[in-house]
Amino acid sequence: MATSSTRRPQLVTTACNPSFISLSLLFISSSLSLSLSTFSHFSKLSISSTEKPLRPAEIALSRKEQMKAAAGKKPSPKGQRLICDLFSLSHSLRKSFLFISFLFFTLYALHLLHLRRLRPISPAAPPLPPPTSLRHIVFGIAASAELWSTRKDYVKLWWRPGRTRGFVWLDEPVEFSDDDTAALPPPKLSGNTSHLPYTHKGGRRAAIRISRIVSETLRLPELPPDARWLVMGDDDTVFFPENLVKVLRKYDHRQPFYIGAPSESHVQNMRFSAAMAYGGGGFAVSRALAAQLEPVQDRCIARYPGLYGSDDRVQACMAELGVPLTREAGFHQFDVYGSLQGLLAAHPVAPVVSLHHLDVVEPVVPGLSRVAALRRLVRGPARLDEAGLLQQSICYVKGEWTVAVAWGYAVQVMRGVMSPREAEMPTRTFLNWYRREDYKGYAFNTRPVARNPCQKPYVFFIAAARVARNGSHGETTVTRYERDPAAPPHPLCRWKVEDPVVVKRVLVFKRADPLLWNRAPRRNCCRARRSTKEEISVEVGICREGEISEPN
């Protein structure tokens, strides 16, 4: 009893010390606040959407207020007695109280770590590569020593020394003059393919050599390290490089892409493949895909000895790699005969990238040689506004004539009002690649040149192109179109509509629009009027608000 009576006053004295009581209250309130904060964070999802959760300020005092209360205020006598009674308890209960407080602090520390994990400091994203430009493209031109002397003129039309990069791949050495060396890509000899089988009875072994151009170009030590795309074409293919850049800029060269277009001939697509990029029209392979193709291509080619050409061998290897064809309507194989006027005058709403089989079809401008006609197109309007080349616009002159402009190439004037739905459809001025097949067997809709003799179009072909400076309004392209003097006369027409035969020329005014293909695809609009009895003036440009192609 004596021992008990001597210990109790000492305990009471320590427990009832005023400073100790203040610190104890601060400790208890802080622990309670931290525990409630932790509990509210982990139970957020359980709060009903219709219930308003308590705010921290409504649950406990702020830390600042707690410190102020602890420093400047004394507990009430009732609070002092509570603390005294609490700390007068047994030693084991005080240990339990301290353990629970420690547990609350531990939970709060875990809560802080959890929030830090939810908000990690992410590293800076790697910079995006600059947009694809002409210097990122390397051409591989398939050629033969037998035909190179005549076909090199097609390459000279579009090749831009000092800007374009690429190589001509030949089967045998040919002599290059000084002019050729300055105006053409450097020549390369294709590798030996005698170890690869070829069994197609109607084809030529050169198909194997040509199919390996992409891989052989990739192996060249002089291949530019910044090359992103390998583009293949034939020596009778004319490319439009700036439009090609606009097409390839849409795609990531770091991914496996195989870009091109099938044939215009439905029969060709059935006999070979509709999933194939026809090589004459050209196709583009991303460097990432070329790197996957190169080590396996010979093994792949050896498995397809019975295929006919080079392009179907390339597609067979793409199929083994699992890469499909990405179609772009501007690559043109032109598996047709006759005149391309019906196709070029109704070009799809897409940038023209290539023209092929130019040795087979008629000159694109009547009265000129094939090369001279293409030179007028490439060195004239294409230099002024390549993005707008061949793009169609449809408008009307006083509700009597329909005017269809294929900018930079031709203008068609027809009696009466022809709907845009019909006018934008290609006319069959060309013949099927297989002359005995259906003359309408194409991979797109076509129409006859005229359903009624009175609507046979008067066609005006490009004659000249220039830039006019219009003061503060900037520069405007002016293209002049004239009729072919050797064109056959039109059939007799009894319509009470003035005959467009009186028109001698058409002038088209258009501002260059390099951002045309940065917007959603849409035909330009045009406004046509008779400037004189013998001349039609047409303004072509972006459609105004609410503007459509309808008779005025």
Image: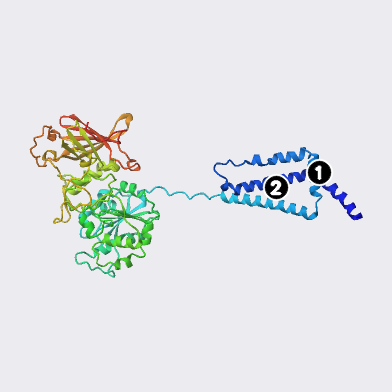
Name which of mark 2 and mark 1 comes first in the sequence.
2
Q: Position of residue 299 (x, y in %)?
A: 33, 67
Q: In the image, residue 73 lies at what x, y percent?
A: 77, 38
- Looking at the rendered structure, the secondary structure element under dot 1 is helix
Pointer 1: residues within 10 angstroms few (<14), some, or many (20+)? some
**Residue 105: image tag:** none
Q: Position of residue 411 (x, y in %)?
A: 20, 39
**Residue 120 showing in the rendered view:** no
User: What amino acid type is highlighted by mark number 2?
Assistant: Ser
Q: Secondary structure at mark 2?
A: helix
Q: Nearer the viewer, mark 2 or mark 1?
A: 1
Q: Disc 1 residue type? A: Arg
The residue wearing badge 1 is 81
The answer to whether residue 165 is visible is: yes
Q: Quadrant of the C terminus?
A: top left
Real-space CA distance between mark 2 and mark 1, rounded to the nearest whole angstrom: 21 Å
When the figure is inspected, residue 76 is found, relative to residue 315, above or below; the finding is: above
- Measured as percent of width and height from the top left, residue 542 is found at 30, 36
Asked whether, in this view, residue 124 is left or right of residue 444, the answer is: right
